[in-house]
Amino acid sequence: MSGRSSNQISEDSGRVGKDSGQVGGIEVLSFGFLIFVSVTLIIVNAWGVIDAKLAVTSAAREAVRAYVETNGENAANIAAIQQALETLDSYGRGGHRATVNSPVVDGLYRRCGRVTVTVSYDLPTVAVPFIGGFGSLQPVTSTFTEVIDPFRSGLDGIAQC
């Protein structure tokens, strides 16, 4: 022997043959991060659709309520559209992507008249938080209908409901 003990030889030869210092599978981290980002974008986009649907539904409902509570057909049209736009703006969905159709009344502006308002919002296909949206626009639409109160004051005639 060359002056080394058998204990030293086994320790030296043991270090050379082991791969305990190697890191294997580092490429999986980038794949895992890609999956995480993709799933996060899907969840954010799904929530964006739900939020847009809530916004247009609330805007249509508030527009119809403003219409049926206002005296005069012209004033009611203006009040309905203004209320719908304010509601969309309060949800952060105002601007050029929002569309409010003029209220449709079945017949004349009278007691028991059925009023319908349709509100839509063009939602981008991919919405990235803090950056904005891009891709083609998909419309999210809601329609709400209400009857003008048969017992309200300020309207001529009798209720024919």
Image: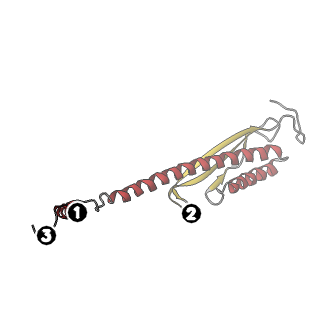
Residue 130: which numbered mark, if any?
2
* Left or right for 16, reference 62: left
Give the class, few, some or many, for how many residues have Cα within 10 Å of label 2's Cα (few <14, many ≥20).
few
Report the amino acid beneath label 3. Answer: Gly
- Give percent across and percent down for residue 8: 19, 64
Q: Is residue 114 visible in this depiction of the protein?
A: no
Report the amino acid beneath label 1. Answer: Arg
Q: Quadrant of the N terminus?
A: bottom left
Residue sitting at 66 percent across and 42 percent down?
Answer: 143
What separation in Å lies between label 3 and label 2 (alpha carbons)?
70 Å
What separation in Å lies between label 1 and label 3 (alpha carbons)?
20 Å
Find disc 3 in the rendering and name its residue.
3
Report the amino acid beneath label 2. Answer: Phe
Foreground residue, 70 or 30?
A: 30
Residue sitting at 65 percent across and 49 percent down?
Answer: 55
- Give percent across and percent down for residue 75: 81, 51
Judged from the image, the secondary structure of the residue bearing numbered disc 2 is loop
Foreground residue, 114 or 5?
A: 5
- Give percent across and percent down for residue 13: 18, 62
Q: Earlier in the sequence, mark 1 or mark 3?
A: 3
User: From the viewer's perspective, is the residue at label 1 or at label 3 nearer?
Assistant: 3
Give the class, few, some or many, for how many residues have Cα within 10 Å of label 1's Cα (few <14, many ≥20).
few
Give the class, few, some or many, for how many residues have Cα within 10 Å of label 3's Cα (few <14, many ≥20).
few
User: From the viewer's perspective, is the residue at label 3 or at label 2 nearer?
Assistant: 3
Residue 15: which numbered mark, if any?
1
Residue sitting at 56 percent across and 63 percent down?
Answer: 130
Q: How is the image coloured?
A: secondary structure
- Give percent across and percent down for residue 76: 80, 49
Q: Earlier in the sequence, mark 2 or mark 1?
A: 1
Residue 87, compared with residue 64, is above or below; it is below
Residue sitting at 31 percent across and 57 percent down?
Answer: 25
